[in-house]
Amino acid sequence: MYRYSKYIARQLVHSTLLITFSLTSIVWLTQALRFIDFIVNQGVSIAVFVKLTLLLVPSLILMILPPALFCAILFSYNKLKTDSELLVMQAVGLSKWRLAVPALQVAAVITVIGYAIALYILPVSYREFRDMQSFLRNNYVSILLQEGVFSNPVEGLTVFTRERDKDGTMRGILVQDNRQRDQPVTMMAEEGKLVQTAQGPRFLLTRGNRQEMRDGKFSFLDFQAYTLDISLYTKDAGKRIVDPQELFVLDLFKPDETISQADNMRRFAEGHQRLIWPFYSLALAFVAVAVMLSGEFNRRGHWQRIVLASVLGVVVVFSAVGLRGAMALNPAIIPVGYLNVLLPCAIALLVLFDKWPSRRAPKISARVS
């Protein structure tokens, strides 16, 4: 690789990493706030919460990489133009194509990284995320076994345990059940333990009492042992709907007779999106360099080129987002999705090799105003 090529590529890599890290951090923070209830209401530890939300990072990086590279190319090439470095390179005989090669090489590497995420890392991480999310939401241990915390696993039910031993025995238990407004029930017990039975999970309370209001009359019952059915908290565990992002590409293209035709079409569209989206890194790179390397040199700035490239990039990205939903509704639109990523590359190549028709040939003017 030529020295000038390494110089440009190094600037692009640094800018891309910085933009990707910044945007991913911001989006990750907004997504993480959606799961803050796991800490507030269910007592999940910070470590578990961070692990859960970090499993979303691959999907965020996959979506952010193409726009981040696009912004990095605009920034880096505009800086090279402003500092007259591109002018010097063109003056020594470097063509637009040779100046574009460093950006396209970086884009090719990022495209490969995108495919690695889309084809393997994303389904693995997102499947673990969904499993962990389902476990935290449905597993009764994460809801009931909270020491010194009033928990509300479902509306109208409050559970409190004073302490919990290492063997799982809980002490100082209070259960307030107001799900039936006209028949509130309060249970207190010295000890309790969660046990598994053939009928499902049960909360075994020992040495306590049960207080209930029924038909306006107060009922009080002392007990040495009382079994509370808590299968309500785990009834959905292990029965969640599989999200298309959890599946590998080959699985997305296999029809599943257990789901509806619409769901199969969504999986089919997701499969094509996995194959198309990483290539947008290369497509947006073509758009950026084609616009930034065309036109005349102007020391007063090239904001018009930046605006034009930004508009074209936004059109390409928003078209990709819109086509993703359209492909799920109408499979006939799928070829348009591939055309949307290939057409910008073809037009950019014509511009870079001066094959695109224009009113005047681009020229270099070294005049200083």
Image (cartoon, rainbow, N blue to C red):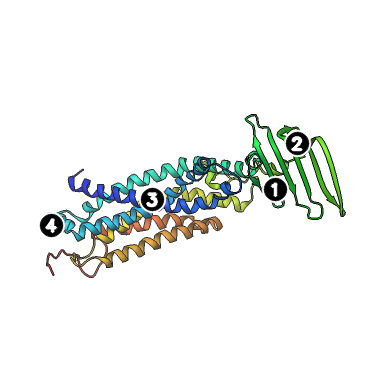
Q: Residues within 10 Å of mark 4 (few under 14, many from 20)?
A: few
> Who's the residue at 40% across and 63% down the image?
315
- Foreground pick, 363 / 21: 21
What amino acid does circle 4 point to? Ala
Q: CA distance from mark 2 to mark 1?
A: 16 Å
What amino acid does circle 1 point to? Thr
Q: CA distance from mark 4 to mark 1?
A: 77 Å
Q: CA distance from mark 4 to mark 3?
A: 33 Å
Between disc 1 and disc 3, whose residue precedes? 3
Q: Is residue 249 visible?
A: no
What amino acid does circle 2 point to? Leu
Image label count: 4
- Foreground pick, 258 / 247: 247
Residue behind mark 4: 91
User: Could you say whether the residue bearing mark 4 is in a helix, strand or loop?
Assistant: helix
x%, y% of residue 141? 64, 38
The quadrant of the rendering that contains the C terminus is: bottom left
Between disc 2 and disc 3, whose residue precedes? 3
Q: Residues within 10 Å of mark 1 (few under 14, many from 20)?
A: some
What numbered label is drawn on residue 205?
2
Residue behind mark 3: 65
In this rendering, which labeled residue sits more in front, label 1 or label 3?
1
What numbered label is drawn on residue 158?
1
Between disc 4 and disc 3, whose residue precedes? 3
Between disc 4 and disc 1, whose residue precedes? 4
x%, y% of residue 366? 12, 64
Which of the 4 image quadrants contains residue 237?
A: top right
